[in-house]
């Protein structure tokens, strides 16, 4: 899915440019939101008729900054995703949540 | 980094709850932005003094929706990240970009 | 603050271009978030050293889409802001909230 | 539209709580994005079937932080909106833009 080679390329890109000094956790959080909104812009006026090449680039940008943030905070993606999925599985029991988009606190 | 097992768990969670019907690309783009801003909220009033447990959960949420979007569009994370990194490496040549946070179009 | 003339200019701009058909409440919500993140981009890597001309343009864009959304939903800005301030004044009592950035549910 | 009384109430709320110290332009930009995404959440899974009371509150929150930012930077809403509209009217000529959601750089 995301291989070690890809992660290393993203981190090397940043190191080669001496950009780690800009990559505070707060700045990376801003960057993830900014890129997420460039992705959202692909769907600004129409939900269906989007440019898949733009979507691929903007989604990649979101993930690149996620990789940078994991690195900055010394976190492992598998670890934090699995910890969150364990919570989600309890918050959204299959029998209650099936087929509904209701938020857990209103289920 | 993100293993096949983790991806499968995220996708099974959605399938078990019959949520694929809500997961249009546009809705997933909104969701990535919404979660990115819950992550940003960890740094709303202070850049340094954040709750690492909250950050882990919100960053995981962003990545979960990225996994859902990749699945929905039949995209491979390694592919699109590497394609974007190839572009970034050209847009930000080491000798020009080193140590600077300037955007490529102003370098 | 925001005069009737300004509002009318914003609404006429949209009408002259026959853009009302794109302005669903959902699309306007996306647009407010997208413009809010162009504003955030002014502060992406540095909190202090921002370009005030860029900030003025992006903040104006956010407000323009707010005006469009108020119009679309038949809402009055003064009404909804005052209703929300009444709630905020109760959620954040002066004696408890003074000098603290704590969220109301943790006060 | 937004009266001087409403603006004064918003500013007094902040002063009474000694919150101006948290209201750096960067923190306000984050806050506008965060609230914009709470507004977007009203439309996360469905564009049509939204809760108007939630929309009113979240849209008010966006505007409250816009008012705080204008105050912080000593800007006038009418001024910056009108300056931006003058630019928009040139970027999107009626004859070219009419009925189309195309971005100005692709018109």
Image: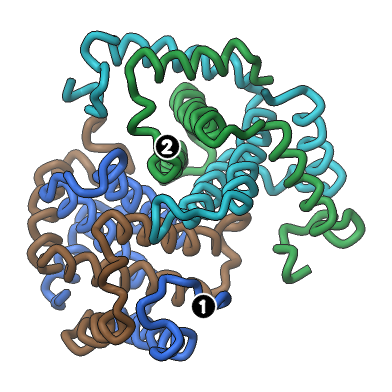
Chain colours: A green, B cyan, C blue, D brown
**Quick one: SS at disc 1?**
helix
Query: Label 1: which residue?
Result: C104
Q: Evaluate if marks 1 and 2 touch, with contact meaning CB atoms under 8 Å apart.
A: no
Chain of residue at mark 2 = A
Residues at discs 1 and 2 both on one chain: no
In front of the other: B21 or A63: A63
Q: In this rendering, does residue C67 appear at all?
A: no
Would residue D97 appear left or right of C28 to someone viewing this image? left
Rendered-image quadrant of the N terminus of chain A: top right
Rendered-image quadrant of the C terminus of chain A: bottom right
Q: Residue at x 82, y 43 (%)?
A: B13
Chain of residue at mark 1 = C
Instruction: Note whether D8 is above or below B25 in the view shown.
Output: below
Q: Residue at x 83, y 51 (%)?
A: A89
Q: In this rendering, does residue A77 appear at all?
A: yes
Q: Within 10 angstroms of label 1, few (less than 14), some, or many (20 or more) residues?
A: few
Q: Position of residue D38 (x, y in %)?
A: 50, 63
Query: Label 2: which residue?
Result: A35
Would residue D59 appear left or right of D97 to someone viewing this image? right
Q: Within 10 angstroms of label 2, few (less than 14), some, or many (20 or more) residues?
A: many
Instruction: Note whether A13 is above or below A75 in the view shown.
Output: above
Q: Position of residue A32 (x, y in %)?
A: 46, 39
Residue A94's tag is none
- For discs 1 and 2, the disc positioned in front in the rendered view: 1
> Going by the picture, which residue comes out furthest to the right?
A95
Q: Position of residue B14 (x, y in %)?
A: 78, 43
Q: Residue at x 33, y 33 (%)?
A: A22
């Amino acid at each position: 899915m995301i291989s070690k080679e890809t992660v290393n390329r993203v981190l090397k890109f940043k190191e080669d440019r001496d950009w780690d000094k800009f990559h505070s956790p707060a700045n990376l959080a801003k960057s993830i939101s900014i890129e997420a909104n460039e992705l959202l812009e692909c769907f600004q006026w129409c939900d269906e008729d989007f440019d898949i090449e733009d979507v691929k680039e903007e989604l990649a940008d979101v993930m690149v900054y996620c990789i940078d943030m994991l690195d900055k905070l010394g976190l492992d993606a598998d670890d934090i995703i699995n910890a969150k999925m364990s919570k989600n599985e309890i918050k959204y029991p299959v029998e209650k949540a099936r087929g509904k988009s209701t938020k857990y606190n209103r289920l």
